[in-house]
Image (cartoon, rainbow, N blue to C red):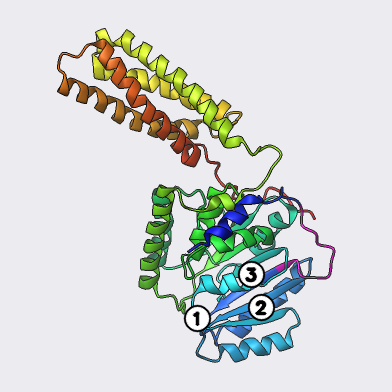
Amino acid sequence: MTNPRLASALDIAPLPPRAPLPTHHDEPVLDVAVPVFNEETDLEPNVRRLHAHLRETFPYPFRITVADNASTDATPRIAARLAEELPEVEWIRLREKGRGRALHAAWSGSRAPVVAYVDVDLSTGLAALLPLVAPLISGHSDLAIGTRLAPGSRVVRGPKREVISRGYNALLRCTLAVGFSDAQCGFKAVRRDVAERLLPLVRDSGWFFDTELLVIAERAGLRIHEVPVDWIDDPDSRVDIRATVLADLRGIARVARALARGTLPWAALTRSRADDPPDGQTRQLTWCAVIGVASTLAHLLLFMALRPAAGQQAANALALLACSIVNTAANRRLTFRLRGRHDALRHQARGLVTFVVGLTLTAGSLAALHLAAPTAGRGAELAALAAAHLSVALLRFLLMRAWAFRARPRRHLTGPATS
C-alpha cells in the first residue's frame, strides 16, 4: 500500500524538465539489474556474456547488479564469486522471492543515472541494449521498454507462449486502455529520477510489477520509448505460467479498480515543463465547459429543426452525431492543444465512443420522459436533453482526458542519442 504522506510529499515537487544526463564522470551511468531465483546453471555464463557485451559496446561506465531473491541452490555462491572476479559486477541478496521485489531493491540502491534490467536467460538480443538506454541518456524519454510485438521485432517461441503474451497485452489494452505494446518483456530501463518517484507507488512485488510500473508512468504522461527486439524463448524457463497468469489477472483487477476510483497515484510523477503550466487542468476544464455549452445549444437547435421530419429519436441521433464530430475537433484544438492532421482520424474514431455514450443517455432520457408523460411537449423534451447533456459533458471530458486524446508511445529511436 502506498504511504499517503509519501505520495503527498512527492506530489508537491514535480519532476524537473527532462534533460540530457551527465556522462563525463567515472561513476556508472548505467546499472543493469539481473533478478535471479535458483539460476545456478544460467547465471555465470550469461552474466559473463552481458559483462563482455557492455565492455565492448557501451561507451560509458556501467555496473551489473545480480539481485538474488531467496535462491536455495548455488546461485548465491556463484553471484558472490562473480562480484569478486568482475569489477563491474555487484551482488545483493533478498530473503523473500519476487521479481518486482528484487528490482525494487536493486534500483532503489543504485546511484546510476539510468537503471535497467534484463532477464538472466538473456532471451532478448543484447544488440538492443544501447538503443534501449540511449533515449534516456539523451533526455528523449523517461522510460524505455523492449517490445516483441512491434514491426521489426523477431521472435522465436512456441504457440502457447505466443498466445498468452498477445492475449495478455490485448487484455491490458481493453481493460486499462494502455498505449504501450508489450508489458512483460524482460528488458526495460528508466531514468533514476523517475524511478525514485515511481517505485514507492508500485504495490506489486512479483511479475505484475512491470505492468503496474508502466501503467502509472503512462497515466502520469511520462514518455515511454519502445525498442523492437529479437527474442528467443528459453525452453528451460522457471516461470510458473498458471500462477503468473492468475497473479496478473488479480493485478489488472486491482489497478482497474484504482483507475475507476481515481486513486492510482500517478499525480506524484508529474513532470514540470514550460509548455505544460500548473493550471493546465483548470484551462482544460474551462475550454471543455465552453465547448460543451456551445455543443449543447447546437444540439438542441438541430434537434428542433429535425424533429418534425425525422421523429424524436432519429432527430436526437443525427443532431448528436453532427455535434459530436465538431465537439471532438474543437476539444482537440482548444482543450488539449493538438495541432495538425497527425492522429486526427484516430481521435475522431475515439470520439465516436463518446457519441455512443451520449446517445445512450440522451435517447434514454427521451424514452423515459415519454414513458412517464406520453403527452410531453417540445419544451419537456428539450429540458430532458439539456439535463442529460450535463452527464454527457462530464463523461466526455473524462474519456477524452484519460483515453481519446492520449498520445501513443513512440516505438522507435528516431536518431542517434547524444550526451
| Pointer 1 local density, CA inside 10 Å: few below 14, some 14–19, many at least 20 | few
- What is the x, y in percent for residue 276? 65, 38
235 displayed left or right of 22 = left
93 displayed left or right of 262 = right
Q: Could you say which disc has been placed on residue 369 in the image?
A: none
Residue 119 seen anywhere in this rendered image of the structure: no
User: Distance from label 1 to label 2 (Cα)?
Assistant: 27 Å
> Which residue is rendered at x = 47% and y = 21% of the image?
326
Q: Which residue is mark 3?
A: 108
Q: Which residues are magenta?
A: 20-30
Circle 2: element type: helix
Residue 79 position by quadrant: bottom right
Residue 255 position by quadrant: bottom left
Compared with residue 106, is residue 144 higher up or lower down, i.e. above or below?
A: above
354 displayed left or right of 15 = left
Q: Which residue is mark 2?
A: 49
| Pointer 3 local density, CA inside 10 Å: few below 14, some 14–19, many at least 20 | some
- What is the x, y in percent for residue 176? 43, 50
Inspect the image, locate mark 1, and give the three-letter code of the amino acid beneath it: Glu
Residue mark closest to the camera, 3 vs 2:
3
Q: Main secondary structure of the magenta part?
A: loop
Does the magenta-highlighted stretch encompass residue 306?
no
Inspect the image, locate mark 3, and give the three-letter code of the amino acid beneath it: Ser
- What is the x, y in percent for residue 4? 52, 58
> Which residue is rendered at x = 50% and y = 57% of the image?
182
| Pointer 2 local density, CA inside 10 Å: few below 14, some 14–19, many at least 20 | some
Does the magenta-highlighted stretch encompass residue 24?
yes
Inspect the image, locate mark 2, and give the three-letter code of the amino acid beneath it: Arg
Name the N-terminal-most of marks 3 and 2.
2
